[in-house]
Image (cartoon, helix red, strand yellow):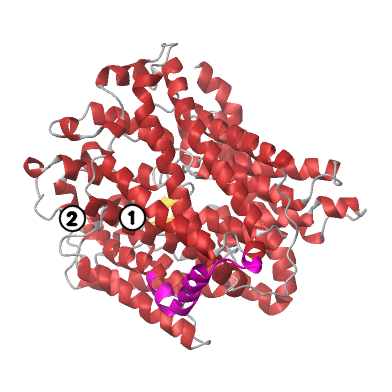
Amino acid sequence: MSDVGEVKPKSIITWRFVIIICVISAISAILAQTFNIFTPPWAQNAQAISVNVPFVVMFLAVLVGNLIPRRVSMKHIAIISAVAQLSIYHFMQNSVTSIYDNFIAARTAPAPYKELIDWVWGPSAEYIQDILSGGVSDVPWGVWLPSLCWWMLFGFLWFLFYSSFLSIVRRRWIDIELLPYPASYQWTIPIIAAAPERRAKGLAPERRFNFFLVGLGIGFFYMWPPVLRFLVPWFPDIYGWSGANYIQWWLGAVNVPATPLGKKIVAFLALPTNMVQYATAMLIPLDILLSIWVTALTVMGLCQVAYLKGYYSGILSVGDMHDRREMLGTMAPFKLYAVFLGMGVSIIIFWLLLNWRYMVDTIRAAIKGPTREEWENEALPYRVAWTIFAASIIALILMYYSAGATVTGALAILLTFFLIHMSGARIYGLSLSGGPADWMYLPSITMYVFPNVTSVEQVTAAYANTMLLTNRPTECMACATNVALWFKVAKDVGVRPRDMYIAMTLAMAVASVIVWPYVLKLYYEIGISGSVRGILQNWWIPRFMDPVTWQTIPGVRPWWPHALAGAILVGILSYLRVRFIWWPFDPVGVYIGVNNATPNPWPYFVGWVVKYLVVKFGGMRVHDEVLIPLVAGVSIGSALCWFIGGVAALPKYIGG
């Protein structure tokens, strides 16, 4: 399965570096949760601090590496960056606090849910009151330990589940298909272009690093006015993004249904005016960009025709883009949520079907036993990877069962999350998007395990616990897209896949153990009610377990024919993409064009035009050495601006 003649780099995992990895993981995980709890509301929406900690870690590592280039290499920097990011993104930066919100909701839920929810959702109500009010110095660890240990092991098992499968497909995706993972440019450009190895040889950073720094400056100062306005309320709203016609949770996007144009065009829901979104789109490959904007315009046109034919009655009077999206997503004739779901989960299905020989070869290699080349060239030998994958499935089923889910329900959850996140890992390889992981899609398979539960009166303990274990804070653990991303970064930087896997595993183990007791101790000290964050994610109970919710979501029943149609479309496009090299439309791009019933062609169209002109008149050299570093820098500069603004605001919000 490996190229025998290929010379692989030596391992850089030493015992000293293992200690450094564990320390960085612990610090990153603790900082992320601390920032998440004490971050002001506006920074929560912008994900200002915790999400951007890994970029700060990367720049610090690059700086230290250039100060002591004989002892730190770009391989060390890549692994340190991966550890920092995965220690945070393993929990999507706020899953832990969100699950603590669910602890509160579970023990204060209305009947019948309060009596039905199982032990993993925290101890009795009297202990929940302590983390709400705070001011308690002694944590009753014995009472909390069973729940906390369950969640520690649960998160780590999901990492093993995803990472073992991704190590099996890594060679195909990264080494053979050369999936670009556009987000990797934000890491590889500064790490490689300003590598300590260049400083050790007396060389200046690569030319593209200069363009990266220019972009970083542009992104930083472009984003400074809205950040400064949050810090200093009297500062003028230069871009007008706080206006009534702008979407609060989508920075710089116009709520088009509230404008005169929205009274005419049914599916024109948002118009981004944030330059960073347009610049970031330019990281995506040309063919994907083309597929996205063509599909988005097509969806808008089809919805307009459907309205003229009598569908979506009264939709033009709906002035909020979210409410209008719900109508487009759930109602006939298209039920776009269902189509989006079917397309998203089938990305990995059809990849497996079209690449069945590769998967069979990995199984044969596992049966035969690991070779020396596998140990040297792969993240894990195939026998080890398949064994971990199978063992994690069994262990997760047992854990779900111990938490009150049925065995069938546990299998349905595993299948759903596998399809969503393995499709997402592949989608992320060609874009900046992931699988259909929004809340309305998560129980799409699991709900059919309980066909006779259609009202609150019919709810059972098995139903309540199974459905609750499909919610978004639970599903977000062990972010598969970023595991795949770091395999790509490892290849570009020259890190052995096995070294990257070891580092990620150590980071996940440390983060999984530390964050749960740390957050509990912090909440006992300050109280959730007294924190800046407060309680944000307690709405899952009872909404997520209410059978009525799923009568119209992800579409008015029956919605499965629309999901099947989306899957068939992906299958056809996947075959055409493999069969005909000239075929222009990629299934990943078409999927993103549907965009969760929110067609948004504008950033992708502009990005496509700019990239096309750059390649046509400047060639790939200008594209690779100027455009990509520039727009990657814009993205990182914007992120760093929010980070600095968020950190500057912390004393005010904590003190207030």
Q: Residue at x 52, y 71 (%)?
A: 368
Determine which of the numbered discs, if any, sits on residue 449 in the image: 2
Q: Is residue 324 at least partly visible in the picture? A: no
Question: Outermost residue toward the right?
Answer: 202
Determine which of the numbered discs, if any, sits on residue 414 in the image: 1
521 w.r.t. 368: above or below = above
Q: Residues within 10 Å of mark 2 (few under 14, many from 20)?
A: some
**Residue 627, quarter of the rendered image:** bottom right
Mark 1 element type? helix
Residue 256 % position (x, y): 37, 55
In the image, what residue type sits under mark 2? Val
CB contact under 8 Å: marks 1 and 2 = no
Relative horizontal placement of residue 46, taking residue 624 as reference (left or right): left
- Give the camera-side residue of 421 and 597: 421
Q: Residues within 10 Å of mark 1 (few under 14, many from 20)?
A: many
Mark 2 element type? helix
- Range of magenta residues: 349-374
